[in-house]
Image (tube, rainbow, N blue to C red):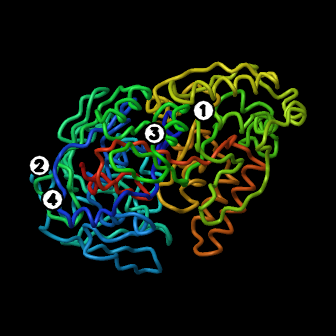
Amino acid sequence: MSATRWLAVLAAAVGLLTTFAAAAGAATRASGATGGTINVDLQSDLDYTDPALDYYQPGWELEYATCLKLLNYKDGNGPQSSQLVPEAAAGFPKVSAGGKTYDFTVKAGWTKFSNGQPVTAASFKAAFDRDADPKMQSPAVSFFGDVVGSDKTPVSGVVVKGNHLIVHLTKPAPDFEARVAMPFFCAVPANLQRDPNGVLAPPSAGPYYIASRTPNKEIVVKRNPYYKGTRPHNISEIHYFIGETLDASYLRVQQGATDYAASGIPPASYAQAAQTSGVNVAKPGKTQLYVKQQLAVNYFSFNHDRPNFQAGAPKSDPALGNVNLMKAINYAIDRHAILAQSGYLAGKRTDQILPPGIAGFRDANLYPLEGPNLKMAKQLAQGHTGSGTFVFYTCNAGSCPLRSQILQFDLKQIGINLDIRPFARAVQFTKEGNKGEPYDIGDDGWLADYADPYDFINVLLDGSTIHATNNNNLAYFNDPHYNKLMQQAQQLSGDARYAAYGALDVNIMKNAVPWAPRSNANNRLFVSSHMGSFTYNNVYGVDFAAVTRK
């Protein structure tokens, strides 16, 4: 969700979108329904619109329309939208050297960036080099640490030879093709500024480009006039309105003033919307509510850099942190009540890292899902509550304030006072991504960048990837023993890979406990009656390139 990073849960527990639609995108293109503007409401601004830095689900949804990648996911509905296909590459790469060298042939001269510059193999090397620049502090570094020379820029293991982009890895990587399809690695001009704050409207080579962005106000997206690819580009313009409350967005969609409540609607309104619109059924002239399970996990992270989670660590493995306290919190929280605050059809309770649907998942029944076990929680917490006051970072809208109150009550039962600090969701994740940020517990969530357990376990918990900013490991969990186990699992393939990750999931949550997982989210999407073909991608969400307006 990433998708991503903070591919994360939005304020009303809405995240990465799964597949359903009123009509297939292909059918819409055949009908010639093009043009018009789609309006989108966001409660708070995106973190970035720069592909090297953007790691927030609504941003990746936008990047799916603007980015040109070597490999990408199909436009369409259902399982096909999870299928990788060549985009800028002439075909899938030639793999050699025992799985350590990938040779992509880049189609030459067939399309351009929105500023008129040609796209070449060098445009993709520029993305790797820019991501690797320490100045950028890009979260992409978690995804190409196995590329030769990735710790320096230019990246020595990414080589351009004519129209070939050749990538040399330090070890075989079964998921490399899926990783290279992430927006971090989409084509960028070689001279694109390297600004750690991000470029607001970078030139792009996909079907659309960001024509303008006024932070905290609006984003205007238009068709790329130089795009010559085969992806659809039906809508003329996508207009984001930023700063609309969830209540306002709910009314605006009903009135047709906006077409997509991208931050969701008030949690208490989903039941009403379902009754009025039906669920997963398009009714002519009516608003539409769609609900689908997604590859996502919502959790409370425990910041291991903070004294409250450092005290009481076992002498045999001090990096584990205050394990008794972390177990106590898992027993103390009321997962049923917490999920209920997100409203009708919000998701399913969990106590594990991997979501159902990811290969390797096995239900382990580690902590109570129906309600707290306060007797066990108090026994574990006794003598391990640190200062007694814990700073909690969360979002300031939707279900977050209600969830915070329940967590505050639950932790009070085991002797912890929760100091609640609410922020706009994107601001919260940006702050938590800074190493040294003074929070003890974070209200966090993760949506799959691609369907592999690496994307949940290694990306979120491998301490060897922690850097100064833009971190994904919001628990700042950095245990050498577990880092090694994660890296060993990454090198496996097939059933052995999935079995290793399934065992690691259970091991971590039983013995290390860096989080309190609480739920696996459903996507709940509310759209206006003006939406025509509304195509969804299993990886990114709304396929803006394929949608139409009635």
Q: Which of disc 1 and disc 2 is earlier in sequence?
A: 2
Q: Looking at the picture, which amino acid does disc 1 mark?
A: Gly
Question: Does the residue at mark 2 contact the one at mark 1 (Cβ under 8 Å)?
Answer: no
Circle nearer the viewer, 4 or 2? 4
Residue at (36%, 35%) from the top-left corner?
254
Q: Which of disc 4 and disc 1 is earlier in sequence?
A: 4
Residue at (22%, 63%) from the top-left corner?
29
For the residues labelled 3 and 4, the Cα–Cα distance comes to 31 Å
Q: Looking at the picture, which amino acid does disc 3 mark?
A: Asn
Q: Which of disc 3 and disc 1 is earlier in sequence?
A: 1
Few, some or many C-alpha atoms within 10 Å of disc 1 (few <14, some 14-19, many ≥20)?
A: many
Q: Looking at the picture, which amino acid does disc 4 mark?
A: Tyr
Q: In this view, does 18 lie to the left or right of 199?
A: right
For the residues labelled 2 and 1, the Cα–Cα distance comes to 40 Å
For the residues labelled 4 and 2, the Cα–Cα distance comes to 11 Å
Question: Does the residue at mark 1 contact the one at mark 4 (Cβ under 8 Å)?
Answer: no
Q: Which of disc 2 and disc 3 is earlier in sequence?
A: 2
Residue where numbered disc 1 is placed: 442
* Of 55 and 169, the residue lying toward us: 55
For the residues labelled 1 and 4, the Cα–Cα distance comes to 41 Å
Q: Which of disc 2 and disc 4 is earlier in sequence?
A: 2
Across and down, in percent, residue 399 comes to 56, 30
For the residues labelled 1 and 3, the Cα–Cα distance comes to 15 Å
Quadrant of the rendered image containing residue 486: bottom right
Question: Does the residue at mark 3 contact the one at mark 2 (Cβ under 8 Å)?
Answer: no
Q: Looking at the picture, which amino acid does disc 2 mark?
A: Asn
Which label number is shown at residue 470?
A: 3
Specify whether residue 473 is in view: yes
Q: Is mark 2 on a helix, strand or loop?
A: loop
Which label number is shown at residue 227?
A: 4
